[in-house]
Image: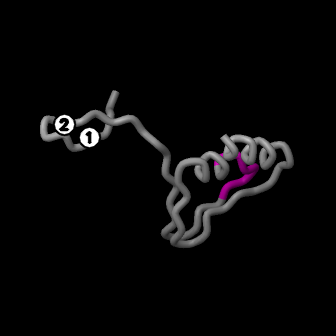
Amino acid sequence: MAGIGIGEQIHKKHFSTAVHDNLVCNSSCANIWLAGLSRTLGAGASVGFHVPYLANDAGAPTAWRR
């Protein structure tokens, strides 16, 4: 839950956020990045979020689709 608090402070103070070149920002980091007044995503960088999934017949995860 600390990530939510950090994101709230970033948003409240109108800070910008960035994920620099070739870095990965997942989970709480992604929520913090979204809180930025302006957001920068460097070359080769990625932001990842948790998503629900269903196991297929072989037991392997399959992306959940609506």
| Residue 5 drawn in magenta | no
Q: Nearer the viewer, residue 26 or 36?
A: 26
Pinpoint residue 23: horizontal percent, then vertical percent: 54, 68
Badge 1 amino acid: Thr
Q: Is residue 57 left or right of residue 64?
A: left
| Residue 37 drawn in magenta | yes
Magenta residues, as a range?
A: 34-39
Which residue carries the number 1 mark?
62
Label 2 element class: loop
* Quadrant placement of the N terminus: top right
Which residue carries the number 2 mark?
56
Q: Is residue 34 left or right of residue 10?
A: left
Label 1 element class: strand
Kindly check if marks 1 and 2 are in contact, taking CB atoms under 8 A apart as contact: yes
Badge 2 amino acid: Asn
**Is residue 55 positioned above or below 9 on the image?**
above
Pinpoint residue 61: horizontal percent, then vertical percent: 26, 42
**Is residue 65 positioned above or below 39 on the image?**
above
Residue farthest along the top direction in this orientation = 66
Q: Residue at x 69, y 45 (%)?
A: 2
Crowding at mark 1 (Cα within 10 Å: few <14, some 14-19, many 20+): few
Pinpoint residue 11: horizontal percent, then vertical percent: 78, 44
